[in-house]
Image: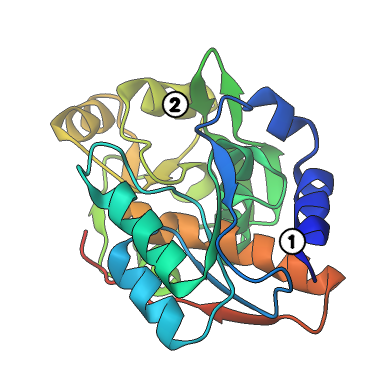
Amino acid sequence: MNTEQFNELIEKLFGDLLKQFNNGEEFAFYNYGPELISRIGYATNITPELIEQAAQKKVDLIVTHHDAWDFVFGMKEECHKLLASYGISHFFVHLPLDYADFGTCNSLFKALGIENVIQQSIDVEDRSLPGVGEFEYPISFQELSERVSTVLCESIKSWKNSQKRIKRVGIITGAGNSTKSLRDAHDSECDAYITGEKILYTIQYAKFIKMNLIVGSHTFTEIFGVKSLVEKIKGKYDSLEIIELVEDHDE
């Protein structure tokens, strides 16, 4: 696969989502690598350490959900310096991947064994509405918590705020800590809400509205969407080698 074919495939996979979020901050292809792409490394985040790892594994292109954050001062500049030095290209795709039918939310539903997606996560007035899905049969909150921890391969935080068995689940991957997001899940009659970040108000409001709450990490609630994307790329170009780049469970 060459870079032109890669960009054409991205346009085909995301369609109108690229037009909707074409503000220069939600996706970009940084072309520092070879024209012919043979090996793709993927992760949720781009960091200098991840680029060093990609170089050791002879990756041609890194695919991530996030770009380097501007407010992690100086890191974006260091990442571009390293990408250029090692000759590795980088593609990131943020909100379009959150809202794609194969993206972060739906991929986490699938990983948790939730096949019936009632409402896909969408952007409304510049904020995310939770995806809503249902288990075929209700399970206990403890079982759901254990399942989330197992799927994410990390310790999670959980608050059992009602005695309901869990059938309907709301999800915003990553930074879904807003009380508005919890209210949206409550309005959608969810029995539990899963996200990747929390603050004090998240916990207080969940308790107040009796919403069962599970919080994993920003990184690992979103990795499944990136994995789904690179699997679709490999499905088109089977000769590609796909490697998951290792990120720490720092959160």
Image: 142 above or below 98: below
* Residue type highlighted by circle 2: His
The residue where tag 2 is placed is 186
In the picture, measured across the screen, residue 181 lies left or right of residue 136, that is: left
**Quadrant for the N terminus in the image:** bottom right
Residue 193's spot in the image, x, y percent? 41, 41
Q: Can residue 193 be seen in this view?
A: yes
Residue 31's spot in the image, x, y percent? 59, 56
Q: In which quarter of the image is residue 119?
A: top right
The answer to the question of whether label 1 and label 2 lie on touching residues, with beta carbons closer than 8 A, is no
In the picture, measured across the screen, residue 209 lies left or right of residue 101, that is: left
Numbered tag placed on residue 3 in the rendering = 1
Which residue is drawn at the image coordinates 75% and 66% (left, top)?
233
| Disc 1, SS | helix
Q: How many marks?
A: 2
Q: Can residue 247 be seen in this view?
A: no
Front position in the image: 82 or 191:
82
Residue 42's spot in the image, x, y percent? 53, 69
Q: Which residue in the rendered view is the most extreme toward the top? A: 125
Q: Residues within 10 Å of mark 1 (few under 14, many from 20)?
A: some
**Quadrant for the C terminus in the image:** bottom left
Residue 122's spot in the image, x, y percent? 62, 29
Image: 167 above or below 122: below
Which residue is drawn at the image coordinates 18% and 35% (left, top)?
199
Q: Which residue in the rendered view is the most extreme toward the left? A: 200
Q: Residues within 10 Å of mark 2 (few under 14, many from 20)?
A: some
* Residue type highlighted by circle 1: Thr
Q: Distance between the residues labelled 1 and 2?
A: 44 Å
Which residue is drawn at the image coordinates 59% and 74% (left, top)?
60
